[in-house]
Structure formats: C-alpha cells, structure tokens
Image (cartoon, rainbow, N blue to C red):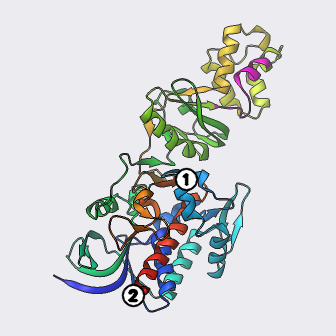
C-alpha cells in the first residue's frame, strides 16, 4: 500500500463548499489538526470565477429555506441557520472583502471581480494551515479500520485520513470539474443518490422554427408559470427574461426550469406558459383590447413597454395583423390575442443540459446526514457539504449561501469530532 501522506481531515473538492469547510476545519483545529484539500482542477475556483458574470454573487440579502428545493425545507433550514447571511458578510469583511447589495437583493464584492472572493478564500485557507493539492483527482475512497484511504486517479498515491469531507459538487458546468464522480464515491461508502439528478438553473429550448427564436436578443420582465395537466398554477417566477436563438434564458427561466422539469416528469400533461405583461390576465387584456378603438393591439403593447418587434410578433402569433385596429378585431381573434399576451404556451423541447446549468438538482438526501455536523448517518467519519447534497436554490446567491453554511457545519463538525476523540 503506497500511503504517502497522513492527515487528520481530507477534503475532496476545493470549490466554494470545500474551501469553506477546509477553512473552518483548520480554524476549529487551531493549528493542531492537519487539513488537506484535494481537487482535480488545474485552476481552482472555476465556478466562483464564472458566477454572476464574473463578479461572484456571494449571497442574497435575505435567505430562507423557501428559496430552495430538493430535500425537505425544514432540513435545509437547520443547516442555513448555522451560518446565516450576516455571518457570511462578516466573514468576508474579516478577509477584506466588502459586499454591496444591488436592487435585486444580490450581494457582490464591491470590486465587481470574482477573483477578489477566490483569492480571499485561498488566503484564508493558507492562514488556517490548510494544504491544497491540485490537480489531484481522487479515484476512490475506502474505509480502513478507523480511517479512510483516498486514492489518486493516475498514480495510485494514497492519502490516509481520520475524517473525510466530500465536497465534489454535482454535475453542473462539467468543465469546472463537476462531473458527478462524487456520487460514485458516496455510493461506494453506503450512500444513496436521489432517483433523478438533473440540470437546474438552466436555459430552456424551443422548436427551432418557433416564432420566439426569431426574436433573439430581446430582454424584458415576464412571468413564467408551470401549470398542471388540470391547469392548476403550481409555480411562477417574474423576472428578466431573455429571448434567444434556441429558446429562453434569463433569471425567470433559470428559476422555473427545475420546477418545470420536475413537474413534467411527474405529470406528462404539465406545461409552461409565459405572460408578457406581468400582473395582467386574459380577462384584463381582453377588456383593454375592446377599448382600443382605432388604435392597434401592437401599439397598445408598445405603450406597455414591449419592443415593436416583439409586439408585432405576438399579434401575428395569434393570427392577427399588427395593423388591424382594435375595433376591427373579431371576437375570436381578440380572445386568442388576449390569451397569447397573458398565457403564451411554450412548447419546451428540453434544456441546454449540465454544460449550461448553474446547479444540479438531486444528490444525497439530507435524511442520510446528521444536520448538526453534516456527518454521514451511514458512514461515520464521512462529512458531506455543498452541491453534492440534494439541495438546489434559486438564482441570486442562494446556492453559494448553501455552500458556505453546509461547508461551515462540515468543517467545524469534522474538526470537533477529532478534538473530542
């Protein structure tokens, strides 16, 4: 057995959650514990650097369990309250990273540069006496009496550790190193993975010849809503919406994507509709169209803030002529147009997959984890945090807050366990 390194805590994955867990394990150990973080990437922090358009949306000003899906919200709440937003802000301030709140509620570094966040985390890990090795890709983890053996993928080098923190991420943005390998490691140690693991916060695709795809580049506030086969309103989001050559993107689309995918899986008749005028209904739009007189529906839509190109396209999609005045619209044409404005049906063909997804839905159920420490219930000495868990949040810093909170609990829990032995 080629054991080349002995450590107290080995952290597999040095992304947001892994770095945070490493820092807090080191701090809790107060220099008495050896903490080793292993990551397969040549350059660390890829997801941190691309987040928020390269600015890194560190967290959101108001975070609660209602903004997450996956495991039970009560379980998610128990972890989030262990390291909340004020503590996150204070932590980064301590590192010299000031955060600013934008109108959306998102908190970014005042530098508007994600490197500020990554560099601060790496410096904090160094001060906490954390050793980081990369590229060091883990092939497998095995138990050996009261310790773990972590094996390198290529050369067979083995690290022996008293405790393991698994922070490998999910499958989103695989070029960053999140390719799902952590699930195999977790399974080998006795864990289960949810029946479905699928992209979340992901753009949606429409048929190539759909009229929306010809409007690529238009951005506007809109409401997207998931409806059941019985037309029950299940979930909706109102936010900036981007029309693209492949379909739809933007915050509202990313937020609704996982709920649409999950509902569609459970209910084949579920559908997605789009309201171009948030707050309006088919009835209110129909009433407004009846009062147009000589004015056109297209002009009315432009007065409501829609770009002319989009306004005309909406009218045409309802089989009406944009130049037709309101008083000349036949009742059926008018009703069809009202529905198209307030409830455009979206024949979604799929999504852009893990390559373009910001987070993974599914993973290790929180029911298999002791939430006060993030230690595995099925494999003592194993701790789990971050995206590998069955927790995914909305766009806007919520997934980073989960990484910080779960990483904190795992880091402190693993170090305290060793100190208590």
| Image vertical order of residue 238 relative to residue 57, above or below | above
Q: Quadrant of the N terminus?
A: bottom left
Q: Nearer the viewer, residue 361 or 202?
A: 361
The magenta-colored residue range is 275-287
Q: Quadrant of residue 175?
A: bottom left
The residue tagged 1 is 73
| Image vertical order of residue 310 relative to residue 386, above or below | above
- Marks 1/2 in contact by CB < 8 Å: the verdict is no
Mark 1 lies on a secondary structure that is helix
Q: Which mark is residue 34?
A: 2
Name the residue furthest left. Answer: 1
Q: Residue at x 71, y 26 (%)?
A: 281
> Local crowd at mark 1 within 10 Å, few (<14), some, or many (≥20)?
some
Magenta stretch contains residue 92: no
Magenta stretch contains residue 278: yes
For marks 1 and 2 on the same chain, the one whose residue lies earlier in the sequence: 2
Q: Closer to the observer: label 1 or label 2?
A: 1
Q: Residue at x 49, y 82 (%)?
A: 125
Q: Position of residue 155 (x, y in %)?
A: 20, 76
Q: Quadrant of the C terminus?
A: bottom left
Q: Nearer the viewer, residue 306 or 13?
A: 13
Is residue 53 in view? no
Q: Residue at x 74, y 27 (%)?
A: 301
Q: Residue at x 50, y 86 (%)?
A: 128
Q: Nearer the viewer, residue 286 or 313?
A: 286
Q: Position of residue 173 (x, y in %)?
A: 43, 56
Q: Is residue 380 left or right of residue 417?
A: left
Real-space Cα separation, disc 1 to disc 2, in angstroms: 34 Å
Q: Position of residue 335 (x, y in %)?
A: 68, 14
Q: Is residue 335 left or right of residue 393?
A: right
Mark 2 lies on a secondary structure that is loop
């Amino acid at each position: 057995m080629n054991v080349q390194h002995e450590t107290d805590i080995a952290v597999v994955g040095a992304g947001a959650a892994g770095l945070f867990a490493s820092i807090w394990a080191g701090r809790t150990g107060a220099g008495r514990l050896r903490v080793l973080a292993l990551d397969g990437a040549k350059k660390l922090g890829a997801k941190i650097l691309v987040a928020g358009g390269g600015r890194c949306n560190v967290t959101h000003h108001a975070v609660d369990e209602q903004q997450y899906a996956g495991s039970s919200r009560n379980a998610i709440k128990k972890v989030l309250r262990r390291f909340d937003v004020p503590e996150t802000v204070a932590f980064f301030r301590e590192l010299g990273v000031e955060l600013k709140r934008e109108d959306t509620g998102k908190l970014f570094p005042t530098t508007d540069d994600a490197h500020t966040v990554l560099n601060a985390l790496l410096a904090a890990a160094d001060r906490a006496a954390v050793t980081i090795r990369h590229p060091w890709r883990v092939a497998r983890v095995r138990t050996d009496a009261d310790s773990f053996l972590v094996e390198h993928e290529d050369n067979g080098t083995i690290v022996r550790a008293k405790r393991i923190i698994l922070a490998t991420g999910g499958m989103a943005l695989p070029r960053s190193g999140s390719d799902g390998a952590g699930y195999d490691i977790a399974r080998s140690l006795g864990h289960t993975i949810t029946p479905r693991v699928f992209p979340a916060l992901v753009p949606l695709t429409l048929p190539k010849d759909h009229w929306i795809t010809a409007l690529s580049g238009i951005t506007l506030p809109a409401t997207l809503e998931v409806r059941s086969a019985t037309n029950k309103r299940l979930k909706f989001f109102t936010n900036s919406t981007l029309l693209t050559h492949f379909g739809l993107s933007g915050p509202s689309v990313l937020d609704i994507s996982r709920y649409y995918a999950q509902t569609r899986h459970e209910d084949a008749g579920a559908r997605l509709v789009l309201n171009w005028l948030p707050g309006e209904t088919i009835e209110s739009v129909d009433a407004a169209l009846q009062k147009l007189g000589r004015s056109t529906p297209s002009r009315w839509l432009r007065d409501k803030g829609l770009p002319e190109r989009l306004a005309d396209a909406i009218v045409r999609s309802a089989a009406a002529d944009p130049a037709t005045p309101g008083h000349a619209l036949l009742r059926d044409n008018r009703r069809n147009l009202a529905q198209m404005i307030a409830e455009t049906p979206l024949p979604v063909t799929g999504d852009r997959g893990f390559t373009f997804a910001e987070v993974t839905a599914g993973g290790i159920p929180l029911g298999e984890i002791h939430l006060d420490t993030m230690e595995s219930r099925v494999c003592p000495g194993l701790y789990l945090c971050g995206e590998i868990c069955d927790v995914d949040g909305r766009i806007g810093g919520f997934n980073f807050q989960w990484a910080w909170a779960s990483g904190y609990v795992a880091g402190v829990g693993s170090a305290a366990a060793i100190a208590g032995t």
